[in-house]
Image (cartoon, rainbow, N blue to C red):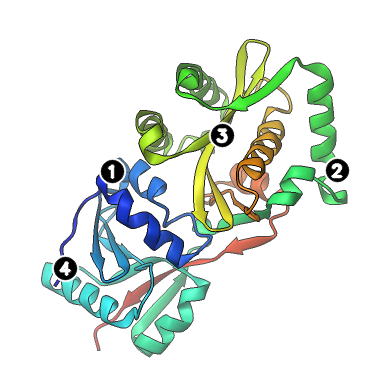
Amino acid sequence: MFDLHPVTLADKAWVDPIVLAEASPSADYNFGNIFLWDETFHQQIGRIGDRMVTLLTYGIAPFFVWPIGSGDVRPVLDEMGAYAAREDFPFILRGVTADHLSLVEAIFGSAAQVTEERDLWDYLYSAEKLDTLSGKHLHAKRNHIHRFEEENDWRFAPLTAADFPACRVLLDKWLASCGEDEHDGVEDEHRAIERAFQYWDALGLEGGALWVGKNLAAFSLGEMTSPDTFDVHFEKADAAVDGAYPMINREFVRHIRALHPEVRWINREDDTGRESLRRSKQSYHPDRMVEKYKVELKDG
């Protein structure tokens, strides 16, 4: 028997060590994403031994996230299954990575129905590659940045609370300029960004701001999600400023590498199935993908 409760800031103290013990590059597990998106996913969390249990009530039926942490996962999954049975909803696991599938097969065998969720796969890039933009595949990115540097009076600085009003103005500009396929989930995303601003220090988030003259051209923010991976939660730029997106990408990665020399990978999260976002993420030629699956446990 275990208890679930709504997510609070106080949970960060015990969740962070569990996230680090999991050492997964997935963006699904870090406390920042759990807390920032809680108004959308209405999560409850709890602890079984050295593992975290997360239940989301988003969509048609509640579902669990893979119970990250350390120690034998089998009894934890048994308790989660018993909880689902008591509460009368299907036992579904999401955020299951390819690394977890062998455990799923060993524990559940043919009772597990596994479905690939491609739209939720995270894009992983070498931090060094995003810093240097070396190689012929990124030649266009380098040219774009060179033009930006030549044509603008620009500077990069760490993102601080004093910048949040300018970020809100930029968000309004971004919304006015984005295509129709980018409007899905915008309200949810804006609520998550506002929570980031509201709880910035308590969450330990890190960000960067790109300025052109006195105007904010772009900002980015995120947090460590494993001992060698930094997760970029949000990145927004003024579409009217040519080159702002590749510039904030490069400068923020350089900033993070200076702060965290141990970072080898940058997780730029999923594309949610949006064509324009998928093209953008693929244009940087990801080095790896964090594959994710849904596992539904059938009776018998």
Mark 1 crowdedness (10 Å alpha carbons): few <14, some 14-19, many ≥20: few
Q: Residue 279 in the image: x percent, y percent?
A: 66, 47
Q: Which of the two discs, 4 and 3, labels the residue nearer the N terminus? A: 4
Secondary structure, mark 4, is loop
User: What percent of the width, then of the height, locates residue 244?
Assistant: 69, 27
Amino acid type, label 2: His
Is the residue 27 above or below the residue 164 in the image?
below
Residue 139, which numbered label? 2
Which mark is in front, 1 or 4?
Answer: 1
For residue 276, the mark is: none
Mark 4 = which residue? Answer: 2
Label 2, residues with CA under 10 Å away: few <14, some 14-19, many ≥20: few
Secondary element type, mark 1: helix
Q: Is residue 3 left or right of residue 239?
A: left
- Depth check, mark 3 against mark 1: the one in front is 1
Residue 290: which quarter of the image? bottom right
N-terminal-most mark, 3 or 1: 1
**Whole-number angstrom distance, CA of label 4 to CA of label 3:** 37 Å
